Amino acid sequence: MQPMIFAVLAVMQAQPASPVPSPVPAPPTPATAPRVVSPGPGASTTAPSDAISLFDGTNSDAWSTMEGKPITWGVTGQIGSPMAVKPGGGSIITRQKFGDCQIHIEFLTPKEDADAGKTGQERGNSGVYIQGRYEVQVLDSYKNETYPDGQCGAFYKQHVPLVNACRQPGEWQAYDIIFHAPRFDDKGQRTAKARATVLHNSILIHDDVELDGPTGYAPFKEEPGDGPLYLQDHGNRVAYRNIWVRPLPH
Ligand code: MG
């Protein structure tokens, strides 16, 4: 080989390999592009565009008593305003039933219970029952001890929340829940337990936990079929506002 050719080869070998052209990403197609959903204004706690609003302050039409009658909890009719448990007025359920879903609900435990010296389960007790079967406990657990699987955020007597994310009584709080209903075979036998992820004030308190069955005192038994959202009258004037649900594909 001639020295000149050697030199040329040496120079060629010193060159970086020509880059392999990367494939051009395919443009999103209707099958792959995520669906567009407009978030609500502000901190996106207001209902997004595809949510079913269950309570925005204006009326309680989405709710009934357990007997199917209009509820007696106070509603002022102003958008954004709350409704509060009317002690003795009874628990309430949504007229619509839900399966797999995302739930947003805001609640406030009253200062009056703490001021009155109430403790444990007597302070700001209510509950958000998914499908009327699985209670995410509502309680004033701000500097208020009780059994951990009954404190605020617990799946009552089934799962202790990962952390206590409570705000003080008199301050608004929120649950964001992702729920997957139990599965059943054709004979009605359960093949998969219900599962849930819960954020309390945007803080993870349950990470895809399994639910063994309805929590204690749940008004509905576990069976195939959707169920309503149920809010508990436990005798304390807990307030709720801004409640919405996004059904999820089964
Ligand atoms: Mg309760």
Image: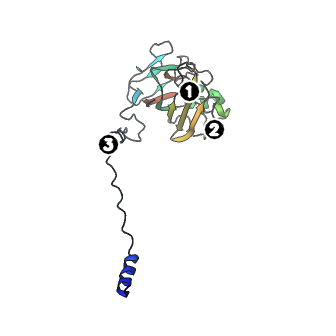
Residue 143 numbered tag: 2
**Image position of 93 (left or right of 141):** left
* Residue denoted by label 3: 29
Q: Nearer the viewer, mark 2 or mark 3?
A: 3
Residue 232 numbered tag: none
Q: CA distance from mark 2 to mark 3?
A: 52 Å
Residues 114 and 89: in front is 89
* Residue denoted by label 1: 127
Q: What's the residue at 61%, 35% (across, down)? A: 141
Q: Earlier in the sequence, mark 2 or mark 1?
A: 1
- Label 3 crowd bin: few (<14), some (14–19), many (20+), radius 10 Å: few
CB under 8 Å between discs 2 and 3: no
Tag 1: residue type? Gly
Q: Position of residue 120 (x, y in %)?
A: 66, 30
Which quadrant of the figure shows ligand 1?
top right
Q: CA distance from mark 3 to mark 1?
A: 43 Å
**Is residue 42 visible in the rendered structure shown here?**
yes
Q: CA distance from mark 2 to mark 1?
A: 19 Å
- Label 1 crowd bin: few (<14), some (14–19), many (20+), radius 10 Å: many
